[in-house]
Amino acid sequence: MPEATAPPSTETSTESVFSLDVGECLNDDGHLFVEDVPKVDCGAPHDFEVFASLELTSAEFDLIGTKTEAEEACKGPYAEFVGLAFDDSVLDLMTFHPTANSWMLGDRRVSCLIGDPGVQTVGSLRGALR
């Protein structure tokens, strides 16, 4: 008789956006500016999965320019992760990128997140091809 596996944990833990790793999942807390996020097991329903982490190369912070650079930088890894270019996909791309304050402290890290608009995902969207 096969050994029973435990169901995924539905508990959340609050984690700093600066500590998110590729492969981790989280739920949207509805805030525009976030420092802490509700991280969840990817086997449980979740809003977003971190599919890439990268560093920005801009010399200066610019609110709109930094956001745009982050989104553009995530599109290459997005295509590799999903198997389809972002512009051809129905899935959402979201980024956690530096703020003016974190930039002054040396933050250049971007977390690239993917989600299915309007519904939660169970498992990964890697290779979703949609």
Image (cartoon, helix red, strand yellow):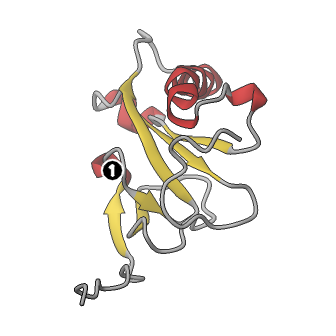
> Element under label 1?
loop
Give the left or right position of residue 11, taking residue 99 as reference.
left
Which quadrant holds the C terminus?
top right
Residue 56 location, x and y as percent?
Answer: 41, 20
Residue pictured at 77% horizontal, 29% vertical? 88
Residue 109 appears in the rendering = no
**As displayed, is residue 68 above or below residue 29?**
above
Residue 26 appears in the rendering = yes
Give the left or right position of residue 58, taking residue 4 as reference.
right
Residue pictured at 60% horizontal, 21% vertical? 72
Q: In the displayed image of the protein, which residue is found farthest to the front?
A: 1
Res 67 → quadrant: top right
Residue 11 location, x and y as percent?
Answer: 38, 83
Residue pictured at 35% horizontal, 44% vertical? 22
Mark 1, Cα crowd under 10 Å, few <14 / some 14-19 / many 20+, is some
The kind of residue on which mark 1 rests is Leu
Residue topped by disc 1 = 20
Residue pictured at 62% horizontal, 54% vertical? 32
